[in-house]
Amino acid sequence: MISKIDSVAKIRVPYRFLLLGNGCVVVAVMLIFKLIQDRQTAALVAGSLFLLSPMIALTLEWRANQSWRSIAAAGAILFFVGAAVPIFGLRIANWGEPFDQLSLFGISGQVWHKASNGLFLLMLVGQAWGSFQQKKKKMALQK
């Protein structure tokens, strides 16, 4: 029989760590654009961070749960597929062109970028929700 302690000891997704890491990604992106003069190169480096962030989250989610059925995973998938990959691909495929003049599927680069901010925030909300659920479950098991 599994005790309450054993069920808490199960591998958990470190949602708080992911939230902190994504906060660091935002700060790093701001620093990248201040330190790298060429905006396209800065965007490429920053975009790499935005590709890694949901990939790390999804890897940790899979290792802990063997699935991506959480709200946090859904947010990470939406951000990765709906923003990070398309914007990164758009920048790479049109190297040398100003981003504000690019479009993908008839949607301007600026609109993609604005939507990516919302999807990134959605990913953070999913991770915060996962952290809240873990804490709630842990407190219930301690009673």
Image (cartoon, rainbow, N blue to C red):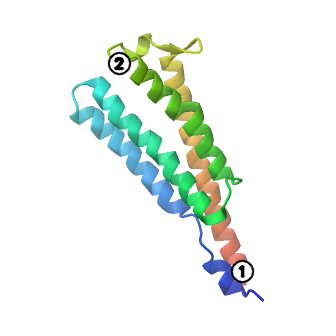
Question: Is label 2 in a helix, a strand or a loop?
Answer: loop
Question: Residue 17 at x, y = what percent?
Answer: 48, 61
Along the viewing direction, whichever of 33 and 13 lies nearer the viewer: 13
Position of residue 107 relative to residue 40, above or below, is above
What label does residue 141 carry, if any?
Answer: 1
Question: Residue 97 at x, y = what percent?
Answer: 36, 13
Q: Residue at x 68, y 57 (%)?
A: 67
Q: Is residue 119 visible?
A: no
Q: CA distance from mark 2 to mark 1?
A: 54 Å
Question: Residue 90 at x, y = what percent?
Answer: 46, 22
Q: Is residue 6 visible?
A: yes
Q: Is residue 110 left or right of residue 99?
A: right
The C terminus: image quadrant: bottom right
Q: Earlier in the sequence, mark 2 or mark 1?
A: 2
User: Which residue type carries mark 1?
Assistant: Leu
Is disc 2 surrounded by few (<14), some (14 to 19) or many (20+) residues within 10 Å?
A: few
Along the viewing direction, whichever of 52 and 114 lies nearer the viewer: 52
